[in-house]
Image: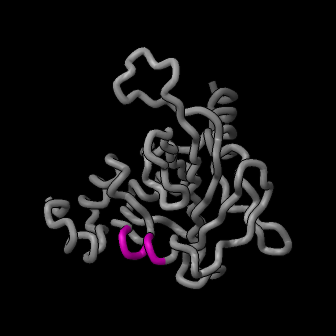
Amino acid sequence: MKLFAAMLLTGVAALAADPEFTSSGELVRPQNYREWIFLSSGVGMTYSRPVAPGSDPLFDNVFVEPSAYRKFLETGAWPEKTIFVLEQRSSKSEGCLNNDGCHYQTGIATLAAEVKDSTRFKGGWAFFGFGQNVKSAVALGQSANCYTCHPQNGAVEQTFVQFYPTLLEVARAKGTLKASYLNQHPAAAH
């Protein structure tokens, strides 16, 4: 039994990881992000690639590193070294059993990350775009949409907790929803 518990803890520890950077400061693409905590999936929520009428939308899948998730459950805030991965997948409707608006996920279109590190990044957070096969990436420049959209519209810090139903309840209970978010969405306070 002790051996099993040690193996289980080792497996959990292997999933937990601080963001890894190259010697030149590029974020290394997390290899095991699909084993992290899945927060939510949305359709057509990105501003990076508008969907033309009649074409299939992108799915956004959001994952967060497990120890950051556990800390958020305790405090309602994201700890330093939190890393999120946004996986955007193409979609299809061809072959659906229900032809009335059905879409399902297919291949990865792009991959992005958001990292909280107040000692490394101006404003405490940075955003990275990996594309499909990029192994490491530099932080996007401050002119990228992320740096204005996330602080203005994120419910907690620079994150879209309002789109993660289970975490929205945690933030509400812990009192960490931003005043700017509550001003725009007064019903969210209850």
Q: Position of residue 155 (x, y in %)?
A: 33, 66
| Residue 90 location, quadrant | top right
Display colour scheme: one colour
Q: In which quarter of the image is the N terminus?
A: top right
- Residue at image coords 56%, 62%: 82
Most common secondary structure along the magenta stretch: helix
Asked if the stretch drawn in magenta spans residue 56, the answer is no
Q: Where is residue 181 in the image (x, y as percent from the top left)?
A: 27, 70
Q: Residue furthest bottom?
A: 122
- Viewer-side residue, 70 vs 160: 160
Q: In this view, does 168 lie to the left or right of 73?
A: left
| Residue 189 location, quadrant | bottom left
Residue range of the region highlighted in magenta in the rendering: 148-153
- Residue at image coords 19%, 60%: 188
Q: Residue furthest top?
A: 97
Q: In this view, does 145 lie above or below 57?
A: below
- Viewer-side residue, 25 vs 18: 25
| Residue 173 location, quadrant | bottom left
Q: Quadrant of the C terminus?
A: bottom left
- Residue at image coords 57%, 75%: 144
Q: In this view, does 15 lie to the left or right of 148?
A: right
